[in-house]
Amino acid sequence: MLKNYLLFFFTFALLSNLSSEIQIKGLVTDLKGRPIESVTVSLLSPNLSLTCLTDFQGVFSFSPLPDGARIDYPLSITFEREGFYTEKKSFRNGGAKIELHIHLTPAQLLREQVTVTALNEEEKAISIPFAQSVVSQAQIQKNQPESIVDAAGRSPGVSFIGKGGISVTPSIRGLARRRILLLKDGARIVSDRSAGAAASFMPTDWIERIEVVRSAAAVLYGSDAMGGVLQVLSRPDFLEKGWSGQFSLTGESASRRVEGSLQLAHNSGPFSLSGRVQQNRSGDYQTPEGIILASGYRYTNGEINLEWKTEKRTLHFSLLASAGRDVGKPERANDPDKYSVYPYENLTIIQGRFEEREVGRLGDLHADLFLTPNGYQLKKMKIGAAQEDISTNRSTDAGGRLFFRKPVSSVFSYQWGIDYFGRFGVRMENQTLKKGIETAVSLPVDAGYRHDAALYFTFDYAAWKSFDIVGGFRYSFFQRRARADGQPKQSQQTAPAFFLGLTRKISPTFTVFLNAGTAYRVPSLSEAFYTGITGRSSIVGNPRLTPERSLQFDCGLKFSNRNLFVGAYLFSYFLRDLIEKYPLPGGSEAYTYENLEKGTLTGGELEFQIQPCSNLELFGHGFYFVGENRSTSSRLNDVPAPRVILGTRYWKGRFWAEANWLWSAPLRHPGPAEVENEAYHVVDIKTGLYLSTHWNLFLRLGNLFNQLYYPNADPDIARAKGFDLSATVVFKL
């Protein structure tokens, strides 16, 4: 009798569990394991339809059920949230309990969803009164770029200058060289190269995002930001508790490049520690015409990050060491008898950051310090003549910023601060060897230093419901000194700068903006004092150079709703004493620098992003710039030809695919240090698969139709890479 009762009870319980007592709950996180709140979880069964949202911990549950409700098999559960690909799980049968851990893959965010920090505070991109763009970590992974400049080079208004290879430098709206400030988490990256700093020190898979400011930024950043700012944000993500890590491996066919990277992190309460190492080796790359000589390189990088973070206080320390070896500088002639190479290129970045929230009436305190010892050596080889021309450069850069940010009310906030940047122990030495015997030596710059100190103030005032005013003022002091060819030389200058921007919000999805500002740039030590070889040929410094100055106007509109973003921008820059590079007369291969009296740079940009349906996205952007020397009616250097990029992206579940088409118009009116360039177009295909929480795969077919072209108007640039297959495998611990 007891046996029959037990059998009846067990059967009843089982049937109940398989019908009305099914319990469904779970957790929703992103691919890094971070909880995602406000995810819409929709359940559909033959006799019931339910919806719930995840909480701030990413947890959802369909228990208890409404009175009289019952869940039956088969059933499906859908997970939807803006900014992520939709996930769906189906069950034909199962037990009484379903416990799920769902990982949502981030989709391409529309521009208004992107948060930027260009004003030293977080703002939605649509609210900022200037032109900017953000290259996200997801975009970098999809594009598999070779360098930071490569990662940002297809952003609106951005191109590059230089002879090719990995040591190219960014150009924004036709301003390049030392007019574009390169930052790594706030630390200035400066170089004595004639083309400016090459962003080859940081592995691209360590980057959280790249922020590109395309308007005048001298008020916050001072000299060297006349053409804009390219800031690399690379602080590791410490949100996960315990141990986490990532290993990635990239292979590329055109240059036989192999790159491996390992990252580990541990988070225990307020304390976090991370370390990462990377090795990158590349051979000479392939074009439709053949191999480009002296284009390969080797890089080894390592970084340590320590952080202590509480509700009120943050302390952060990082050390990045980058060592480049045999970094090639390809030539247009592609002559095996004459080539250039950097035998070594070393950079160390030591950074400290301190934040204290609500420091009395002063507001939030922020302090940043950095120290960057660096050095490189350039060799120009002439094999037939058994001659080596060698240039060795080294210096130590240091700087810091201290500022307070104070929200006075819901409509007014301000910040004020001081910052400093200095270069110490700058030494530039030249040497010539013939058949291994030293025949000449010179010391164009020795014991050089540079000091930049400034005070600044900025404010943000939402005076009316639909108007927002952002402005600021900066006053800087500069001092430079060096022994140039044994003679002491020095100079001192001061420079003011202002910025005023107005944003008018016509509707929650439509804004227009207008800004005006001044900017300046002090000649570098090498421009003023260095005479000797460069990666291009040779240069003669000009100690008579005066600081560059500009008056800049910028306007635009941004429209953004759930499925559409459109941005259109116009700008006009009035330039004085612009420092340009000119070839010396007499047919020599040497160049020098001169100030031109007046110049103008005008142009426009257009960008758009459309998501016509849940699985498809269309996007593109283009620009048209004109730079003119008003004294001679000739064109300015470094202004790229008009360019258009169009693309489409499709995804299905964890799979995605993308096609890009880039078209560049011919350049018929080059600057004084450039040559004419023909039009070209390039097609790229990219695809990827998020296999699981731990495994991701990315593929890229670059220059699909193996086009032969020069990517800019530099007279010494080599042909661009031909057809290129690259693949990246990512494993997350």
Image: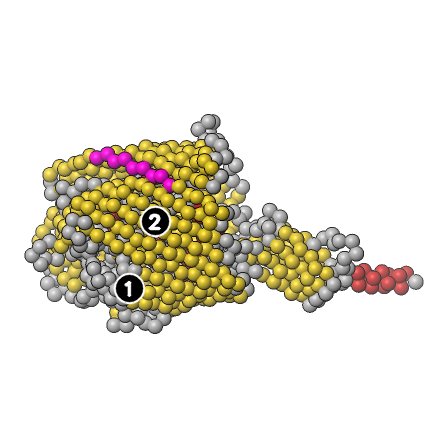
How many residues crowd around disc 2 within 10 Å: few (fewer than 14), some, or many (20 or more)?
A: many
Total residue callouts: 2
User: Disc 1 marks which amino acid?
Assistant: Ala
**Does the segment drawn in magenta span residue 495?**
yes
Residue at 44%, 40% (x, y): give it.
Answer: 467
Tag nearer the camera, 1 or 2: 1
SS type, badge 1: loop
- From the image, give the main secondary structure of the stretch colored magenta: strand
Closer to the camera, 568 or 368? 568
Q: Position of residue 650 (x, y in %)?
A: 49, 65
User: Disc 2 marks which amino acid?
Assistant: Arg
Q: Which mark is residue 214?
A: 2
Residue on which the image places disc 1: 665
Q: Position of residue 720 (x, y in %)?
A: 28, 65
**Does the segment drawn in magenta span residue 64?**
no
Q: Where is residue 366 in the image (x, y as percent from the top left)?
A: 41, 35
**Start-end of magenta stretch:** 493-501
Residue at 25%, 57% (x, y): give it.
Answer: 162
Horizontal side of residue 571 vs 648, given as left or right: left
Q: Are marks 1 and 2 in contact (CB under 8 Å)?
A: no
Horizontal side of residue 660 vs 428, given as left or right: right
- Name the residue at the top extreme: 361
Q: Colour scheme used in the picture?
A: secondary structure
SS type, badge 2: loop
Q: Position of residue 189 (x, y in %)?
A: 30, 46
Horizontal side of residue 395 vs 661, given as left or right: left
